[in-house]
Image (cartoon, rainbow, N blue to C red):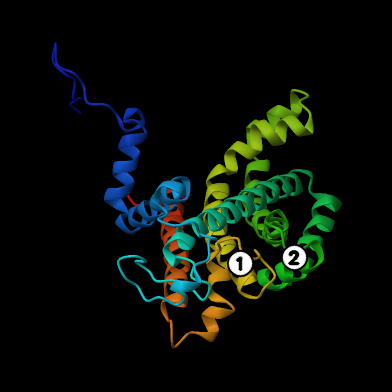
Amino acid sequence: MALNVPAVGEIAEPVAGERGWMGAVREFCRRRPLGAVGGAVIVVMLLTAICAPLLSPYDPVATDFGAMLSPPAKAHPLGTDAFGRDVLSRLIYGSRTALLVGFGAALMGATFGAILGVGSAYFGGLVDLYLQRLMDIFLSFPLIILALALVAILGNSIPNVIMAITIPMIPRAALVIRSSALTIREMPYVDAARAAGFGHVRIILRHMLPNVVASYLIMLTAFLSQAILAESSLSFLGLGVQEPTPAWGLMLRGAAVDFAEAAPWMALFPGLSISLAVFAFNLFGDSLRDALDPKLRTL
């Protein structure tokens, strides 16, 4: 079989492993355009949250009773609410709340779940039995119901909301990561690490956790959309972020419901923002799963 050997002075084309992260991004965009669109929306959200003071035309908590319920116009592109606050400014600053709660809850839920899942699979026996039965108890409650109960106990601050959303996510991540870790536990290099006398913590951290990164990233992106939706639901029900903090779910409750006919923009734009954010994270997460899972990877 002939080999393609570059001639003298000719530069060989880089192989797939040497193309760098830019090449990987281009390949991802080419193969999964919907995931690329979702990723672009996420990047725009991140930039909006970071540059909120520069992009916001008004103070999001400043009231102007002379401009109450103003329809979308040049002065207020997305109108104002019942207190005369600019809807666009509150949407921009609300992205900070959504991403803070989303990334905080998703990161902690996926991380703690990964540690518990790998530890449960590694030790097995009674540890695995009792830990999985505990996870089953948490899994028997819907995420939003358990989050409602926890935030009612802990309080309405943003850290408490993050914790209330994180706890129901941990068993979901642990269940998925455990299924991957069970296969890794039987690999020869894990047996070799045991034979070499390495401790349990080192084997878990150095030899097992790095090999469940793909499953971890998939769970992380899936949890992001769930956390944003859960935070919006809690705020809408009055158990999440409290006034006057800008939050998309908070903009949908109270006056937005009372003035749904007279000022529909009060509920329309926050609802679209939530839908777009959840849709973008779901698209990106599904595409990332297809790219990282060898069983779903296309040739």
Inspect the image, locate mark 1, and give the three-letter code of the amino acid beneath it: Ala
Q: Nearer the viewer, residue 5 or 221?
A: 221
- Mark 2 packing: few (<14 Cα in 10 Å), some, or many (20+)? many
* Farthest top residue in view: 8
At 30% from the left and 66% from the top, the residue drawn is 74
Q: Which residue is mark 1?
A: 230
Q: Nearer the viewer, residue 48 or 71?
A: 71
Q: Nearer the viewer, residue 285 or 144?
A: 144
Q: Quadrant of residue 56?
A: bottom left
User: Reading the chain from its start, which is encountered first: label 1 or label 2?
Assistant: 2
At 66% from the left and 31% from the top, the residue drawn is 206
Give how far apart the Cα atoms at labels 1 and 2 are.
11 Å
Q: Is residue 130 left or right of residue 31?
A: right
Picture layout, residue 68 above or below residue 135: below
Q: Position of residue 71 (x, y in %)?
A: 37, 76
Inspect the image, locate mark 2, and give the three-letter code of the amino acid beneath it: Val
Q: Is residue 171 visible?
A: yes
Q: In the image, which disc is placed on residue 151?
A: 2
Q: Indicate the secondary structure of the residue bearing disc 2.
A: helix
Q: Is residue 153 left or right of residue 41?
A: right
